[in-house]
Amino acid sequence: MGQRGRKKGASGEQSRGLLLSIAAEEFALRGYHETKISAIVEKAGVTQPTFYLYFENKEALFHELVHLFRSRLGDYTQKSRLEPGIAEAFIRQRIVEGLTPFFRFFIEEPHLASIGFSVAPQAAEIKDQLADEIRANLMSEQQAGYFRKDMDMGIVADSIVGTMERFIATQKARPFKQPEILADEVVRLFLYGIAAP
Amino acid sequence: MGQRGRKKGASGEQSRGLLLSIAAEEFALRGYHETKISAIVEKAGVTQPTFYLYFENKEALFHELVHLFRSRLGDYTQKSRLEPGIAEAFIRQRIVEGLTPFFRFFIEEPHLASIGFSVAPQAAEIKDQLADEIRANLMSEQQAGYFRKDMDMGIVADSIVGTMERFIATQKARPFKQPEILADEVVRLFLYGIAAP
Amino acid sequence: MGQRGRKKGASGEQSRGLLLSIAAEEFALRGYHETKISAIVEKAGVTQPTFYLYFENKEALFHELVHLFRSRLGDYTQKSRLEPGIAEAFIRQRIVEGLTPFFRFFIEEPHLASIGFSVAPQAAEIKDQLADEIRANLMSEQQAGYFRKDMDMGIVADSIVGTMERFIATQKARPFKQPEILADEVVRLFLYGIAAP
Amino acid sequence: MGQRGRKKGASGEQSRGLLLSIAAEEFALRGYHETKISAIVEKAGVTQPTFYLYFENKEALFHELVHLFRSRLGDYTQKSRLEPGIAEAFIRQRIVEGLTPFFRFFIEEPHLASIGFSVAPQAAEIKDQLADEIRANLMSEQQAGYFRKDMDMGIVADSIVGTMERFIATQKARPFKQPEILADEVVRLFLYGIAAP
DNA sequence: AATGAATGAGCTTTCATTCAT
DNA sequence: CATGAATGAAAGCTCATTCAT
């Protein structure tokens, strides 16, 4: 979302972007209902009608943000899909590479992530869908012999999504780590567990 | 919560309990703002002023439910704390025993769980706190040599809480499993991971 | 509509009736958009939310008034239908009897009449429908030989409806006449015309 | 009004005329409040400020249309006045000649007619005034012995105006008739009535 | 002659909440 | 123990209208 210039008579797209960015923050921090149009426009330094110049209504604005989140999430999901026939030595590496963009995205767009993963009414559906895709991935790896057979990949997928969810929710309070490091730690956890070797 | 007798002229406590139970369901299904007092009392077969006979206001009612959740959660947290000096052979068993009541609780009181883990504004705090306690537990076990040292127990704790969160959110859509089985699967996952042995 | 008691704590139906009656007057005098809910409730001595206790919204209230008008109009239309086989000597008398209730209605409920005949968007349709029924009546009399064959009964029906419309619109400014007298004059006009005999 | 050239860079007067013509249609079809300036300018292919280049405001535009209607109506009213001393044999013919331009006008400018006869708040006044002039005419003819003395010419005049009103409102749905024919039928109706001779 | 961008003013509607009985 | 009736406060949205360019 980015810079928040507040020049008078800013070009339309600027005003729109500003409103969008402020709205994302407000929605993420307060939730849908606690977010008032009046507060958004005040922070943006414009009046209410200006808001309706760029967005059909509050709901449409919110949907736009959710959509934005979903489409970016979809991109990373697609790229994270493991192509068949990876040498066993590289599999962990590839999983980490698939996971990294998610964490990077959550770090770069914390408000959007918060909206899509918790404030949106569709949040449940979004996470379900993500979990489903992850499960499908895991299961095919499981078939291929990379993972233990006696493990319900549904639970694993949910745990991974749950881990993301917690990460998004606790980010600000957490010592910053590079997305690659994070992904690596998560992968290690889910691959090998915590039991002392 | 439980049974919902709707007899006319129910005695005070009955009305109160009924309202509380209906409110839990409504809050869980719709969220705080989407839940209207008018809808609660209608379902309970009483009028709005009756509601205010038993609850100070909407927020107080909600807080009561959240409080209920927190206190039960606190109970299980306490009981799940591993006492020092458990023989290594029993440690897994003890962890499972500590985790099981959580899942049983989530299954028995899905509405309350949903409120405390996702609809309450304090949900983040509640989960943070839970994660914190779990992390403390894990770390002392880690010190004791039960778990690997090269693992950030903060992430592990968050993953466990995230797993609970997903479980609560997806319960209805999921094939029912006994809480003990669930706990066992989760523990296996986090102890040994999914990598093929 | 009638009496406008303004007792505090009036029974619900009274408030509703009061609002309805005031609304009819406002709509008739100012039109749909110029009529503000705020003005209606102010005149009724209640607050805006009270309005929404009794009516779904402004449009529903308006529709109720239009519906009221239509149903009463429908009653009189039905009763005005001439049964076949009236002796020629009585036909004029019967037409007058059919027309009288319309004028009585318009006199008794001028606001409702104004709404149904001019402020409602459906006014055109209402009048079309009325004209249609009148035309059908006239044509069957025409077949029966009571009326001249060389006259387009569509125009006659429209003229009669137009006459009603003007009557409704100009009532207040007009010297009061009994509905029977009015009906009689109109019938004479349309039966015999104004040409000197 | 007529042709609607929409060439880019149309000269000022063209834009103005275009706006006026579109506005007439919109007002006639939707009424004053349902007609949005934004819709008018969109149909005209210009922007809102352009509108204010040519018209002071919405009301002024509307007034201009009403004024246009009134002045044309006034013309025909004047011409329809019967000069004294017409031979009885020609009277009917003269009345038809006086009425024809009205119907021609209503057919040629249906939007304007609709505005002046029904959407304008002054519509009542306009019709009252017209009825008044017609009544004055009729009464002097009545004095001159052309018409029956036992007939209230106020009612007759209102009936004639009401007939016009209905004609304007139902024009589109009606089989087209030449204005002369229409005028003739109306005159026959009001002169001789529909009673079988 | 025309516009992109913005606004002042206002209206309907919704809720949680409270009297008086 | 319970209610019919009513309200204070606020939110979302719309529209005619106007700068500055």
Image (cartoon, coloured by chain):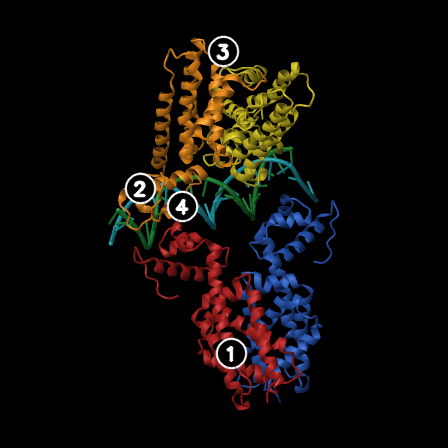
Chain colours: A red, B blue, C yellow, D orange, E green, F cyan
Q: Amino acid at mark 3?
A: Ala
For the residues labelled 1 and 3, the Cα–Cα distance comes to 98 Å
Label 1, residues with CA under 10 Å away: few <14, some 14-19, many ≥20: many
Measured Cα–Cα span from mark 4 to mark 2: 15 Å
Q: CA distance from mark 3 to mark 4?
A: 53 Å
Q: Chain of mark 4?
A: D
Image quadrant occupied by the N terminus of chain D = top left
Q: Earlier in the sequence, mark 4 or mark 2?
A: 2
Q: Marks 1 and 2, Cα distance to the nearest angstrom?
A: 60 Å
Tag 1: amino acid: Ser
| Residue under label 1 | A80
Marks 2 and 3, Cα distance to the nearest angstrom? 51 Å
User: Tags 3 and 4 in contact by the CB under 8 Å rule?
Assistant: no
Say whether marks 2 and 3 touch (CB < 8 Å). no
* Residue D111 x %, y %: 42, 36
The residue under label 4 is which amino acid type?
A: Ala
Whether residue A47 sits left or right of residue D167 in the image: it is left
Q: Are marks 4 and 2 in contact (CB under 8 Å)?
A: no
* Tag 4 and tag 1, C-beta contact below 8 Å: no
Residue A108 appears at what percent x and percent y? Answer: 43, 71
Report in which chain the residue with disc 1 lies. A
Q: Are marks 4 and 1 on the same chain?
A: no
Q: CA distance from mark 4 to mark 1?
A: 49 Å
> Where does label 3 land, which residue?
C196
- The residue where tag 4 is placed is D39
Query: Residue D37 appears at what percent x and percent y?
Result: 38, 43
Residue type for callout 2? Arg
- Which residue is tagged 2? D16
Between circles 4 and 2, the one closer to the viewer is 2
